[in-house]
Image (spheres, helix red, strand yellow):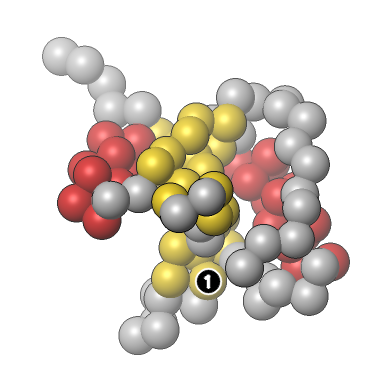
Amino acid sequence: MITPMRVFVLIFNARTENEGIHTIREGDRNKILMFESEDDATRFALMLEAQDFPAPTPEPIDAEEIKEFCESAGYEWEIIPENSNLVVTPQN
């Protein structure tokens, strides 16, 4: 049996009616970042917060679930390997 790959995504307003997932706009497409490491997801969330974004919450989720969501929503996705040097640029 294949073990599901757990990743972390950034959720705004986690566990509320106004919940939303963080995406990065690339051209005319949205991309969801899937972090292998909760620490990296937390660091990225803090960098977003420092740029005056609302504070997102790193949430664990099965990578296949996010891939399926991306396919249905027309989004791209990217897995961010542990200890990646991500540079945050201001995004919408």
Residue 68 versus residue 54 in the image, above or below: above
- Residue 11, x across and y down, in percent: 50, 64
Residue 13 shown left or right of residue 75 in the figure: right
Placement of the N terminus among the 4 image quadrants: top left
Residue most extreme to the front: 27
Q: Can residue 59 be seen from the camera position used here?
A: no
Amino acid type at circle 1 is Phe
Residue visible at 81% across and 68% down in the picture: 51
Count the labels in the image.
1
Residue plotted at (72% across, 26% down): 83
Farthest residue to the right: give it: 50
Which corner quadrant of the image does residue 21 belong to?
A: bottom left
How far across and how far down the image is residue 77, in percent? 42, 39
- At mark 1, the secondary structure is strand
On the question of residue 16 being in view, the answer is: yes
Residue at the far top in the pictured view: 1
Percent from the top left, x then y, of residue 46? 77, 59
Q: Could you say which is closer to the camera, residue 31 or residue 59?
A: 31
Q: Residues within 10 Å of mark 1 (few under 14, many from 20)?
A: many
In the picture shown, does residue 78 fall above or below 61?
A: above
Instruction: Please indicate whether residue 21 sits to the left or right of residue 74 in the image.
Output: right
* Residue at 78% across, 30% down: 85
- Residue 40: % across, % down: 69, 40
Q: Which residue is the site of mark 1?
A: 12
Relative to 28, is 51 on the left or the right? right
Quadrant where the C terminus is found in the figure: bottom right
Instruction: Please determine whether, in this image, residue 76 is positioned above or below residue 59.
Output: above
